[in-house]
Image (cartoon, rainbow, N blue to C red):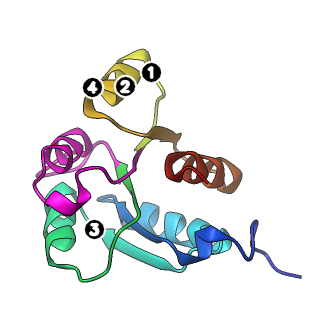
Amino acid sequence: MTDKITTGDALSSINVMVVDDEEIALRILSVILCKLGISNVVTARDGADALEKLASSDATIDIIISDIEMPRIDGYEFVRKVRLGAVPKYKEVPILILTGRDTDENLQKARFHKIDGFIVKPPHARDLDRKIRQALGL
């Protein structure tokens, strides 16, 4: 018996970038992603770090999960830079935003920034699985 929620499917081959300034959040998300069968996880401490890693990495990132509130470059600014082509090959990458609140203001900003979905903190494995599959069209 396995502790993975899904096995033998497309999630096992995707590369995920998780962007969050809190070490515990990075660890929790990495553990949940592993339980979903995703072992290829790149982490970044904030939007600036994420942009640097996207620009310098040889691996292709299939989806990004980013916190909103971070130092240097916050989640919305990070998404704006990605969508405007700061790293051209990621201009259309699916992006999910982590938030403590799923408010109308956040939903409006999501539409404006072309965000593919919200994940309310703390994330639950089944919700994360569903949101990733939706964003990737699986």
Residue shown at the point (20%, 44%) measured from the top left: 83
Compare marks 3 and 1 and give the one earlier in the sequence: 3
CA gap between label 3 and label 1 equals 25 Å
Secondary structure under tag 2 reads helix
Question: Magenta segment range?
Answer: 67-96
Q: Give 80 or 47, whichever is nearer the viewer.
A: 80
**Amino acid identity at mark 2:** Asn
Say if mark 2 contacts mark 1, CB within 8 Å. Answer: yes
Is 69 magenta? The answer is: yes
Give the mark nearest the N terminus, 3 or 2.
3
Q: Is residue 34 above or below residue 126?
A: below
Name the residue at 14% across, 71% down: 55
> Which quadrant: the N terminus?
bottom right
Residue bearing the label numbered 4: 112
Find disc 3 in the rendering and name its residue.
Answer: 44
Per the model, the C-alpha gap separating discs 4 and 1 is: 14 Å
Residue at x 34%, y 26% (from the top left corner): 111
Query: Which one is closest to the eye, mark 4 or mark 3?
Result: 4
Local secondary structure at mark 3: strand
Q: Secondary structure at mark 4?
A: helix
First in sequence, mark 2 or 4: give its number.
2
